[in-house]
């Protein structure tokens, strides 16, 4: 039975280098033989290569789309997390006798890191129908490697609806709620001009 992806929303961010290294050792779904990674300016596209020949070469297979942006990463952030912003022995208050005559604050070492940002709904992040569900599984594996961002989705597997929620690299409990669409009540609350007996 075919599996489907009905809704999907993603705010995932991964270093571009991590995306490339992810596919060096990952086990792909059986329907996918390989992942082709291409970059067009500031857009990263991960395309599925079908494992079987039953898909025409003219049929576009599912692809994941991400925007690429640069973020400045400070190299001493980990040290600050362990020791605090003033170091292990420094004090935030009181005179700094040894600092007299020196620069007030040294520039913190940093570097620009390119990030792949898988952000948006299904049509933005996961495109094309062929191999769509296996490519969704690839996205879930990427989400488990991401330190930042959320992936939520509603899928159907073997006829059963399933909810997926991955937050900051960890699977979280998720449920599906069925709610009444407010648009269904607009016709009963308003005037139905088409069947109004006073209009000829």
Image (spheres, rainbow, N blue to C red):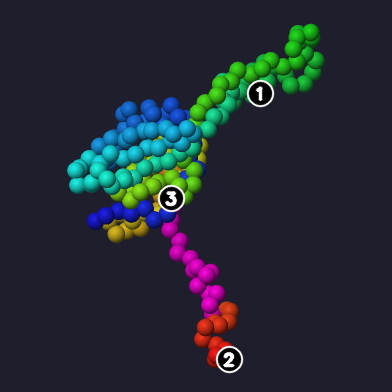
Check the picture and name the quadrant holding the C terminus: bottom right
Position of residue 69 relative to residue 84, above or below, is below
For label 1, the SS is: loop
Position of residue 132 relative to residue 37, above or below, is below
Please name the residue shown 29% across and 59% down the image.
159
Which badge, 1 or 2, comes first in the chain's sequence? 1
Q: Which mark is residue 176?
A: none
Q: Position of residue 15 (x, y in %)?
A: 47, 30
**Disc 2: which residue:** 198
Q: CA distance from mark 1 to mark 3?
A: 42 Å
Magenta stretch encompasses residue 64: no
**Disc 3: which residue:** 123
Q: Is residue 58 left or right of residue 198?
A: left
Position of residue 118 relative to residue 156, above or below, is above
Which badge, 3 or 2, comes first in the chain's sequence? 3
Q: CA distance from mark 3 to mark 2?
A: 45 Å
Q: Is residue 83 left or right of residue 9?
A: right
For label 3, the SS is: helix
What are the residue bounds of the magenta stretch?
174-188
Q: Position of residue 179 (x, y in %)?
A: 48, 66
Please name the residue shown 27% across and 55% down the image.
2
Q: Position of residue 29 (x, y in %)?
A: 27, 41
Position of residue 198 relative to residue 179, above or below, is below
Local crowd size for mark 2, using a 10 Å CA cut-off: few (<14), some (14–19), many (≥20): few
Query: Can the viewer see residue 169?
Result: no
Query: Can the viewer see residue 71?
Result: yes
Magenta stretch encompasses residue 176: yes
For label 2, the SS is: loop
The quarter holding residue 27 reads: top left
**Disc 1: which residue:** 85
Please name the residue shown 36% across and 33% down the image.
37
């Amino acid at each position: 039975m075919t599996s489907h992806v009905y809704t999907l929303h993603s705010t995932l961010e991964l270093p571009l280098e991590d995306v490339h290294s992810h596919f060096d050792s990952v086990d792909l779904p059986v329907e996918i033989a390989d992942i082709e990674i291409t970059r067009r300016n500031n857009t990263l596209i991960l395309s599925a290569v079908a494992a079987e020949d039953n898909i025409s070469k003219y049929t576009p297979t599912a692809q994941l789309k991400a925007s690429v942006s640069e973020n400045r990463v400070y190299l001493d952030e980990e040290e600050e997390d362990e020791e605090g912003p003033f170091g292990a022995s420094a004090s935030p208050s009181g005179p700094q006798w040894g600092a007299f005559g020196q620069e007030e604050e040294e520039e913190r070492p940093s570097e620009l890191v390119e990030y792949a940002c898988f952000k948006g709904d299904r049509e933005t992040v996961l495109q094309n129908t062929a191999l769509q569900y296996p490519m969704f599984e690839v996205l879930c594996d990427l989400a488990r490697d991401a330190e930042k961002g959320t992936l939520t989705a509603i899928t159907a597997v073997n006829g059963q609806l399933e909810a997926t929620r991955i937050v900051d690299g960890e699977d979280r409990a998720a449920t599906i709620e069925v709610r009444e669409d407010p648009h269904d009540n607009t016709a009963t609350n308003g005037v139905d001009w088409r069947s109004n007996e006073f209009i000829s």
